[in-house]
Image: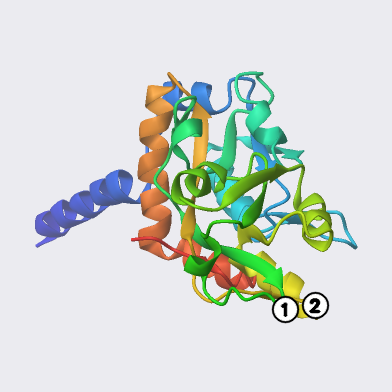
Amino acid sequence: MIKKLAVICAIASFACLTGCATYIPAEVRSQLAPTGVMRVGLNLSTTLLAKRDSASGELRGVAIDIANELGRRLEMQVQFVAYATGELDKAIGKNEWDVAFFAIEPTRAQRVSFSPPYAEIETSYLVKKDALMLRAQDVDREGLTVAVSSGAGYESMLAGLLKHSKLLRTSGFADSIRQLNEAKVNAIAGLKPDLIAYAAKQPGFRVVDGKFGAVEQGIGIQRGMDAAAQYLRTYVTDLKQSGFVSKSIASNNASGLTVPQ
């Protein structure tokens, strides 16, 4: 009986060592944090994923939670590197960050290796309240012009989607609003939750019904980091299956983010 118990304990101990603790190869650590500190690039214009607390200045959000959990598992310090709209993309290849939280899109994927998407955000259009356009599909018509922030994660998707409307690339959302107010464009493309929040505060605007797509969000690293890329694929899959991402979305009140299957 004692011998049988010893065997059971040994099996349980081995299961814990192999299942409860995950061995991370040194190559993965060196690729994700070559200096010993993992530098994490963030786009602060996507406030659903990351934003700075107005009172404390502390960064909060789903991307922050995922990055901190990655650092915990790697037993590495995390250093956040924040960028404005379009600037994170320009920093690819400049050795300013080790991992970055990006929208997954084909042009960028030629320069960055992506994890599977950990979340996605619907995209739609903001228009003037008296505009004739009621649905997302109404925006793609001859004679209409759509503003999009240059470098936004949905820019290339929208460029391939619109068959009749013209596309005007702007320097950011404020510039897009100016173009709409000056009647130089008829609609503004953007992340649907952000557009809804803006329209709620500005009675002269509304968001059309429906969407033109959804932007998948992933973790990107420089190409050629094969060991790290494989680890991030497993890591993100685990976070989704374990409910970590769903809990982070709820705790951050990130309404508008969904977890893809």
Q: Residue at x 67, y 26 (%)?
A: 91
Mark 1 or mark 2, which is nearer the start of the sequence? 1
x, y (%) of residue 103? Answer: 54, 45
**Given contact means CB atoms under 8 Å apart, are the residues at marks 2 and 1 in contact?**
yes
Picture quarter with the C terminus: bottom left
Viewer-proximal residue, 9 or 17?
17
x, y (%) of residue 174? Answer: 82, 54
Q: Residue at x 27, y 50 (%)?
A: 13
| Dot 1: element | loop
Q: How many marks?
A: 2
Q: On the rendered structure, is 106 left or right of 175?
A: left
The disc labelled 1 sits on which kind of residue? Lys
Q: Residue at x 83, y 62 (%)?
A: 181
Locate residue 123: give its quadrant.
Answer: bottom right
| Dot 2: element | loop
Q: CA distance from mark 2 to mark 1?
A: 5 Å
Residue 200 in view here: yes
Report the residue marked by disc 2: 204
Viewer-proximal residue, 84 or 169?
169
Report the residue marked by disc 1: 129
Locate residue 177: give its quadrant.
Answer: bottom right
Compared with 33, 212 (above or below) is below
